[in-house]
């Protein structure tokens, strides 16, 4: 069900091309999708991580770069001094964030989908993260970018 949700959202936002007339099955399409899957543990509660990801000031505090974030479903955001833009698709307070986002240099209308699942783990949080629908050839660059610009900085912010 999750893969279907991502594929539908990505198709709506133009992040994935529509299937050809001789359409492949959903399973075949999902298997060919480019996906980044990362999991990390943090010494912060889910509510603190949720706020760090969705509060403009806290995001700027941990990342060291400006951010404007509208915390509502459908709300727009601009991160890393305008380098990343997007919109919140689903927000479940302190549990889940799903966003459509793009780097401003990507082709017009190309959006990817990111999903942060925040799971309580003792006094901390286990984050399950998935990123799909980004332009071909960017997997390694984006995967290392999540580590450098999110996970390592959040671990320093929440020692």
Image (cartoon, grey):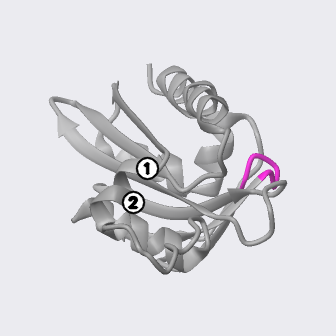
Callout 2 environment at 10 Å: few (<14), some (14 to 19), or many (20+)? some
Residue 79 included in the magenta stretch of the image: yes
Q: Which residue is mark 2?
A: 29
Position of 58 with respect to 104 (left or right) is left
Residue 90 included in the magenta stretch of the image: no
- CB within 8 Å, label 2 to label 1: yes
Q: Which residue is mark 1?
A: 32
Secondary element type, mark 2? helix
Position of 96 with respect to 20 (left or right) is left
Percent across and percent down for residue 2 are 27, 61
Name the residue rendered at 41%, 74% in the picture: 23
Question: Can you say whether 123 is above or below 45 in the image?
Answer: above
User: Which mark identifies residue 101?
Assistant: none
Percent across and percent down for residue 12 are 52, 79
Q: Toward which corner of the image does residue 158 lie, by quadrant?
A: top left
Query: Which of these two is toward me, 85 or 153?
Result: 85
> Alpha carbon of mark 2 to alpha carbon of mark 1: how far?
5 Å
Question: Can you say whether 49 is above or below 153 in the image?
Answer: below
The extreme front residue here reads 22
Name the residue rendered at 28%, 59% in the picture: 27
Q: For the N terminus, give its image quadrant.
A: bottom left
Secondary element type, mark 1? helix
Q: How many marks?
A: 2
Q: For the C terminus, give its image quadrant.
A: top left
Main SS, magenta residues: loop
Percent across and percent down for residue 103 are 74, 53
Magenta highlight range: 78-83
Question: Can you say whether 159 is above or below 129 in the image?
Answer: above
């Amino acid at each position: 069900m999750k893969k279907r949700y991502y594929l539908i959202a990505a198709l709506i936002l133009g992040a994935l091309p529509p299937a050809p007339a001789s359409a492949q099955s959903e399973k075949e399409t999902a298997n060919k999708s480019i996906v980044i899957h990362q999991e990390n543990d943090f010494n912060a509660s889910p509510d603190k991580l949720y706020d760090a990801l969705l509060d403009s000031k806290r995001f700027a505090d941990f990342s060291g770069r400006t951010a404007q974030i509208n915390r509502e479903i459908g709300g727009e955001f601009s991160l890393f001094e305008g380098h990343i833009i997007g919109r919140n698709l689903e927000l479940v307070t302190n549990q889940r964030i799903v966003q459509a986002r793009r780097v401003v240099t990507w082709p017009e209308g190309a959006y990817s989908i990111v999903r942060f699942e925040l799971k309580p783990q003792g006094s901390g949080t286990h984050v399950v993260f998935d990123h799909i629908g980004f332009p071909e050839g960017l997997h390694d660059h984006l995967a290392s970018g999540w580590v450098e610009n999110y996970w390592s900085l959040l671990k320093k912010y929440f020692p």
